Image: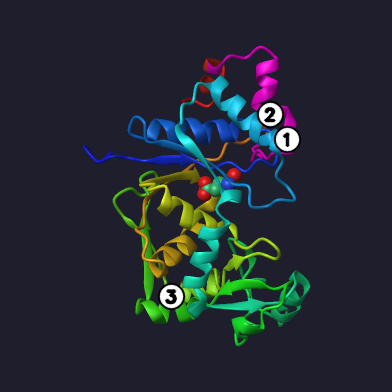
Amino acid sequence: MASGAVRRTRFAPSPTGLLHLGHAYAALLAEREATSGQFLLRIEDIDRDRCRAEYEDAIYQDLIWLGVQWQRPVMRQSDRMGAYRDALARLAPYSYPCRCRRGDIRAALSAPQEGGLPAGPDGLVYPGTCRGRSLADAGPDDVIRLDAARAFDALGIDWIAFRDEAIMPGHDHALTRDQFLGGIGDAILSRRGMGTSYHLAVVVDDADQGITVVTRGKDLFDSTYIHVLLQKLLHFPTPLYHHHRLIRDDAGKRLAKRDDARAIRHYREDGATPQDIRRMLAL
Ligand code: GLU
């Protein structure tokens, strides 16, 4: 840990189900990695179809029970649509509307390729069918995508990098322009009917909350390259990252919200203490 520097971290759950052991690990680790009083909470509720007020309440109750203490106020993404709209407008020179559905993308990619279809953090790498379209022609059902090649050209760079204090600390994790275009491609900035996407919202919010160390699961490691590119386009600083291990069940499967049996709430109802949870997580 860098001595003396203030470290501000966050826990950013989506209220789409009860918190499970993996969330408890993420929250406790983020709190531990912050300088005292610099741990923030953010409710990631842009997906209005899947988020529920009762799950948001359950998040607060479970965190209080675990003994996690966060700084007020809590940021809620559903209150921040104006900030996402502004960021999207600033990205307009490098973005375009896309009307392709998953089936169209699959069909466009299905020419024989060695090693299967190219896939990145958001699934299949978009083949660019709509890339020539203008934002002025965006339809209500379109998504907005980042033209990644145009973004790299505008920035005048041919690679991007970030540092991770848990994975190869002290070394850059870097991706060249060609690796980005081939393995990630044109990420979605605004989903159908949502006005933003996970990638855009997380970048804008981490900057506005002044987060210096982003702690989150390893499953989001590749998405970080998208976030770094967006930070550069929006003139935001790139924080330090800490991608942590994922908590798995006894069969080695990653925990998901649907695995209700592992919900913190159920451990608690069965008589477990917060210390038991920490012990199970080796924290
Ligand atoms: N909201 C995301 C989740 O619940 C976390 C995103 C992040 O930490 O960047 O998995």
- The numbered mark, 1 or 3, whose residue comes first in the sequence reads 3
Side (left or right) of 238 relative to 23: left
The stretch drawn in magenta includes residue 87:
no
Judge by depth and name the residue closer to the eye, 166 or 74. Answer: 74
Is the N terminus in the top left, top right, bottom left or bottom right quadrant? top left
Q: CA distance from mark 2 to mark 1?
A: 6 Å
Give the residues in magenta: 252-274
Side (left or right) of 256 relative to 63: right
Judge by depth and name the residue closer to the eye, 122 or 140. Answer: 140
Q: Residue furthest bottom?
A: 132
**Rendered location of residue 221, percent (x, y):** 49, 54
Amino acid type of the residue tagged 3 in the rendering: Arg
Q: CA distance from mark 1 to mark 3?
A: 38 Å
**Rendered location of residue 10, percent (x, y):** 46, 40
Tell me the quarter of the picture where residue 229 sits: bottom left
Q: Residues within 10 Å of mark 1 (few under 14, many from 20)?
A: few
> Which residue is depicted at the point 37% across and 77% down?
155
Q: Report the residue marked by disc 3.
A: 177
**Rendered location of residue 246, percent (x, y):** 55, 40
Label 2, secondary structure: give it: helix
Q: Residue furthest left?
A: 4
Q: Report the residue marked by disc 2.
A: 262
Query: Is residue 77 among what the camera can see?
Result: yes
User: Which numbered dot is residue 259?
Assistant: 1
Q: Residues within 10 Å of mark 3 (few under 14, many from 20)?
A: some
Amino acid type of the residue tagged 1 in the rendering: Asp
> Which residue is depicted at the point 42% across and 62% down?
228
